Image (tube, coloured by chain):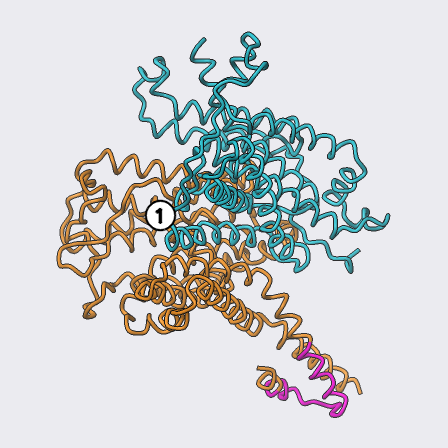
Amino acid sequence: MDTIYYLIQNMLPVAIPLLLVALGGMFSERSGVINIALEGIMLFGAFFGALFVYLVQDSSMGPQTILLLGMIVAAVSGIIYSLMLSFAAVTMKADQTITGTSLNMLIPAAILLFSKMYFNSDGITTSKSFYIRKMPVLGDIPIIGEMFFQKTYLTVLIGLLFLVAAVIIFYKTKFGLRLRACGEHPQAADSVGINVYVMRYAGVSLSGLLGGIGGFFYAVGVMDGNVNGHTGVAGFGFLALAVMIFGQWKPIRILFAALFFAFLRTLAYSVSLIPFLDNLGIDQTYYKMLPYVATMVVLAFTSKKSRAPKAEGIPYDKSQR
Amino acid sequence: MQDKKRVSQKNKYSIKNITKGSGFSAFSSALLAIALGLIFGFVIMLFANPGSAFKGFNYILTGGLSRFGNVLYFATPILMTGLAVGFAFRMGLFNIGASGQYTMGMFFALYVGFMWDLPTGIHWIVAILAGMLGGMIWGFIPGIFKALLNVNEVITSIMFNYIGMYFVDMWIRSNSTMYISTMSRTNYVPLSAQIPSLGVEGSNVNFGIIFAVILGIVLYIVLEKTTFGYELKATGFNKHAADYAGMKGKRNIVLTMIIAGGLAGLGGAFLILSPSGIAGSSMTYEPVNIIAANGFNGIAVALLGNSHPIGIIFSSFFISHIQRGGSLANLVGYKPEIIDVVIAVIIYFSAFAMIMNAALGRFIRKYITHKEVEVPVIEPDASEEIKKEAE
């Protein structure tokens, strides 16, 4: 039982960044823009969030207040960075994959450059701990309390709130419907008076918001508040893309996909703590590969009947209506 | 009358050709992207340290000239990964997995270099071929996933970048012949497995670059002069049309990815089998779980060269040149990462440089059509003159 508690407690802070970033990718792709830059957006948000934490960590603010403020900083910086993608992909009609790749390459280099020049290190190291040993009231609930509200981070709760918000925006608002229309048949959407460019900008910006927050939550929940230019976010942006595809571009399925991947990753990094797996004597590297291999297996089975948005990746050209 | 009409139509085509033709627009948009990238880099340098920005920028621009041998040497791997990306791109496949293929090729070359005992003359050749094989295997996987299971090659290659990197790092760390654990890097490759040096004083340049350039030319011939190349480009232009014309799309996808992988693998072999400046030593690899940067630089090289093999040869020289310059900028306090920033910005702009360029082209076209009104009949030969004017 302790092992299960341990796995769940460690899995959730990993699952939340994946969930948020995959939701971001969903908003972007359902509006018709392939967002391969999620990795870069995450790192950008993580960097500025961590920079904010670094600058205010000596003040008298409580850690959870700093976390919330850092989240806002990360969200804003994520949106700003995603504007570079939407400018190229929507306004300039550039190849979305290439643009995304360049944005992914830009940020690690810029972080290394900046950190080496100002901090003399490969990234930002903060000394603030956001860890919550036990949440008041909720943590006292038997079993569930120990699973979800002890030894965790505030990010988990915030992340679930974002999921609820995303579902409502996506399915229950006019905006969500219009967004989805732009990803399926932008010409038709345009013909009924929806501004496709604006909707696509909105979709990418939402992915920037969620991507930035996801990156910051990764830095908080997985890296203990640090950001490193070399390792970046360790391919989480790409894994989030896989999570999104596995979740078939639907929020609730994305939640389960994120939990699945987070479980595999947590398992990979806690092999030595689980006696059964430790006794097998398999090289730990195999476990580290597990999330990536699992992605491939999952995609191999799901891609044939993929429900990808029809117009994704195709720049919208009004004159071709 | 009919004749005149024909001429004017041909002329119309030729004007279109000037501004929309691949040669003109590719070259000028590459220059546009490079200029914007360098300006961006300069602005960053100004922000970071205004005092020595000019000096540092000067190093970036001209620093490589004094080390031309090393420019060629470091151009070798990115030329190969650039070809790997560019070749697949002609077919409409985005081979972001050049990193993994490169790493795999490097490992295969290392393995043959260390573990096989072959006569001096053949050893390095076999090691290079092994590298090619390694890359081919790692290129085959995304190809087969794409062809049979319809999995997007971008996701597959990214995943296999990680899988390949973890595999190679594990294999190297567990092999005591290859790996020196105290220095956390690989051993020097045995002399017989090293590619012969070109003997340029003060640089590591070796035969690898010559092979790489030859391969670039061979690829050009394959693309432009063979049926396979034609099918490949046709598929890249319009997949459905190519299918309809009876081209074997699936077979071509797998074949393209195998070739692309082989090219990237050769890049890894060329890099790791290179002798370095100190006699007897060679390049080494540190298994630190980081995806090889040369694969991603290959994307920059390929885009800058407009996925044209000859263009890629020159763009790899250019990227390598500013990389050398960037490491010299360290002398005035700038970190070499500034070049990675510049390269990323160049790719960003080259993704839509064609469109910016088209605007420029429209302007030129307007200018020419305006002139046309004054001189209604233009001889067919005049198209050459217009071309010169436009440039």
Q: Is residue B188 left or right of residue B85?
A: left
The location of residue A224, given as percent across then percent down, is 43, 33
Quadrant location of the C terminus of chain A in the rendered image: bottom right
Residue that numbered label 1 is attached to:
A121
Residue sitting at 39 percent across and 53 percent down? A118
B367 is within the stretch colored magenta: yes
Quadrant location of the N terminus of chain A in the rendered image: top left
- Relative to A318, does residue B46 appear above or below in the rendering? below
Q: Is residue B323 left or right of residue A194?
A: left
For label 1, the crowd category at 10 Å Cα-Cα, with few meaning under 14, some 14 to 19 and many 20 or more, is some
Q: Main secondary structure of the magenta part?
A: helix
Extreme residue toward the right, this view: A192
**Chain for colour orange:** B
The location of residue A242, given as percent across then percent down, is 55, 35
The location of residue A73, given as percent across then percent down, is 57, 43
Residue sitting at 74 percent across and 57 percent down? A317
Would you say residue A187 is visible in this rendering? yes
- Relative to B93, does residue B149 appear above or below in the rendering? above
Disc 1 sits on a residue from what chain? Answer: A
Q: Which residues are magenta?
A: B363-385
Residue sitting at 51 percent across and 60 percent down? B345
**Chain for colour cyan:** A
Residue sitting at 58 percent across and 41 percent down? A211
Check disc 1 and report its element: helix, strand or loop: loop
Amino acid type, label 1: Ser
Q: Is residue A163 left or right of residue A231?
A: right
The location of residue B324, given as percent across then percent down, is 33, 65
